Image: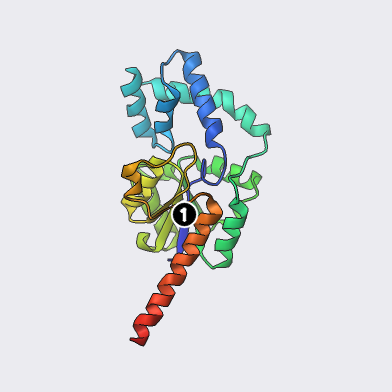
């Protein structure tokens, strides 16, 4: 196992709750009837998929872009002045993995410039060898494109890579690319469908990092045994 690729919002940064607040606020003020539970379906969802989902929920092909634009208008000024909140043990987890010689990357649905800005403000950007935005590929999550591209960028095969995700669309994207997936649930727990495809459900990021290290050690031990035999 050579690398670990992280989602950002809801996984590294405790920002998904903020996004959800303003998605709901924007939709309500624009007169769209989308429930908070339905908005959870949009987490990490690629743009083309999100447009179709919003159309299905509202009957309007322009609903998603209208809500998104207004959400940014409401939320961006708040994000500019606030301290970027971190998920628990994020620094400890990244330090553990970095010290173990593991390649670290980010694969996110957020724009590249905004991702870099948030990671810099959060004090995390120096941990990562590559930062990849789904805006650079044809299809966003849950399609595998962003993880396949991320693996190419870091020089690791998907089967040599762990992905750490918080939401279903990200989990499916990583799994479809052939990565082993660790889920650290943020706003919802995994349902049976996800439990069948994740390698491990962690309570926090440090637990996820320790799982990666233990997994690698187990492989080394097994390889040593095979060599002796």
Label 1 crowd bin: few (<14), some (14–19), many (20+), radius 10 Å: many
- Can you give x and y, in whole percent of width and height, for residue 105 in the image? 50, 55
Residue 127 showing in the rendered view: no
Q: Residue at x 41, y 16 (%)?
A: 33
Q: Which residue is mark 1?
A: 5
Q: Is residue 137 above or below residue 16?
A: below
Q: Is residue 5 left or right of residue 192?
A: right
Q: Is residue 113 left or right of residue 136?
A: right
- Can you give x and y, in whole percent of width and height, for residue 184 in the image? 48, 47
* SS assignment at label 1: strand
Residue 9 showing in the rendered view: yes
- Can you give x and y, in whole percent of width and height, for residue 52 in the image? 32, 28
Q: Is residue 185 above or below residue 35?
A: below
Q: Is residue 118 left or right of residue 55?
A: right
Give the total number of marks visible in the rendering: 1
Q: Is residue 16 above or below residue 198?
A: above
């Amino acid at each position: 196992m050579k690398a670990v690729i992280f989602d950002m919002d809801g996984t590294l940064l405790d920002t998904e709750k903020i996004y959800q607040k303003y998605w709901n606020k924007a939709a309500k003020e624009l007169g769209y009837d989308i429930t908070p539970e339905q908005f959870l379906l949009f987490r990490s969802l690629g743009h083309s998929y999100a447009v179709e989902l919003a159309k299905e929920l509202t009957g309007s092909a322009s609903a998603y872009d209208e809500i998104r634009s207004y959400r940014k208008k409401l939320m961006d000024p708040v994000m500019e002045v606030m301290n970027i909140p971190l998920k628990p043990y994020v620094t400890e987890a990244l330090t553990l993995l970095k010290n173990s010689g593991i390649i670290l990357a980010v694969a996110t649905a957020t724009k590249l410039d905004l991702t870099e800005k948030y990671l810099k403000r959060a004090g995390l950007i120096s941990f990562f060898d590559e930062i990849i935005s789904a805006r650079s590929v044809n299809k966003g999550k849950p399609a595998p494109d962003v993880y396949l591209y991320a693996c190419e960028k870091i020089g690791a095969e998907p089967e040599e890579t762990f992905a750490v995700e918080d939401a279903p669309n990200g989990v499916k994207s990583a799994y479809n690319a052939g990565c082993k997936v660790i889920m650290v649930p943020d706003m919802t727990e995994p349902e049976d469908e996800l439990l069948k495809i994740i390698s491990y459900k962690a309570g926090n990021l440090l637990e996820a990092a320790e799982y990666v290290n233990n997994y690698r050690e187990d492989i080394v031990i097994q390889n040593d045994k095979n060599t002796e035999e």
